[in-house]
Image (tube, rainbow, N blue to C red):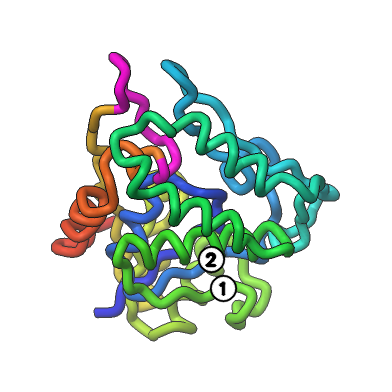
Amino acid sequence: MTVVAIHQPNYLPWLGYFWKMARADVFVFLDDVQYSKNGYINRVRILDGEASRWLTVPVSFRLGDTISAVYPAQSDWSPRHCDTLRQRYRRAAAFSEIWPDIENLYRDAPDADLATINRFFIERLAVMLGLTCRCLTSSSLDTSGAVGDDRLIRIVQAIEPGAMYLSGRGGANYQDPGKFRDAGSRLVYTDFAHPEYSQGIDTFYSGLSVVDALFHCGLARVSDWLAEARPGVGTIG
């Protein structure tokens, strides 16, 4: 059964985002939904010494804009973020291994809208991590103006009737499993548990950008975590 996962294109997202991608055959970026301020679409947390801090893409937007209509407000955000990551992680155990790929990632970042930028980052990182899911955008699919669960169901059905929808655990708070069953699709939730690893400090911070795990653990170890994701897919909704 084809597994479909759907998520907003977040900026340099956490390990759980890529865990979800690792369990999907098709991953759909919700690029045409409304941009939400103070979320993870234009920012992510990274390690800063013995604390965590936001790494934020400054953006220009109007209320009601979709993610694909939002643009960076400063042209030099990319080199500044690249320099911040170099400064914050230069002493991390796997820095010398990972840094060339991260530096190239920022060097090649497109001059585009936020949805396109984030998708570029995510897809490049996914290739680094050995993920093979096919990536699509919601704006390329016909959902006939549906919203909420109905829109998710139409996205899934547009990809393959009867496909399985893989949701994050938070979806259990607002999704109706009955609607998915009535549409002939199974709804399942990811069972991601954030691994702990050495960050070089006494307190472990979970939920940071995937680059934190890469800089501290190296590509092989992070890829191995994600390679374990496929069996079982998740828990049934």
Give x and y (percent) for residue 205: 36, 26
Q: Nearer the viewer, residue 150 or 170?
A: 170
- Main SS of residues in magenta: loop
Q: Is residue 196 above or below residue 11?
A: above
Q: Residue at x 26, y 41 (%)?
A: 217
Q: Is residue 34 visible?
A: yes
Give x and y (percent) for residue 152: 50, 67
Q: Residue at x 19, y 55 (%)?
A: 224
Q: Residue at x 38, y 85 (%)?
A: 161
Using residue 94 as the reference point, say whether residue 74 is left or right of it.
right
The answer to whether mark 1 and mark 2 are in CB contact below 8 A is yes
Quarter of the figure with residue 210: top left
Q: Residue at x 36, y 62 (%)?
A: 128
**Considering the image in quadrants, where does the C terminus appear?**
bottom left
Q: Earlier in the sequence, mark 1 or mark 2?
A: 2
Using residue 73 as the reference point, say whether residue 183 is left or right of it.
left
Q: Secondary structure at mark 1?
A: strand
For label 2, the residue is 29
Q: Nearer the viewer, residue 73 or 194?
A: 73
Range shown magenta: 199-211
Quarter of the figure with residue 175: bottom left
Q: Is residue 204 magenta?
A: yes
The circle drawn on residue 3 is none
For label 1, the residue is 137
Q: Amino acid at mark 1?
A: Thr
Q: Amino acid at mark 2?
A: Phe
Mark 2 burial class by Cα count in 10 Å: few <14, some 14-19, many 20+: many
Q: Secondary structure at mark 2?
A: strand
Give x and y (percent) for residue 50: 42, 16
Q: Is residue 168 magenta?
A: no
Q: Nearer the viewer, residue 48 or 12?
A: 48
Q: Is residue 16 above or below residue 38?
A: below
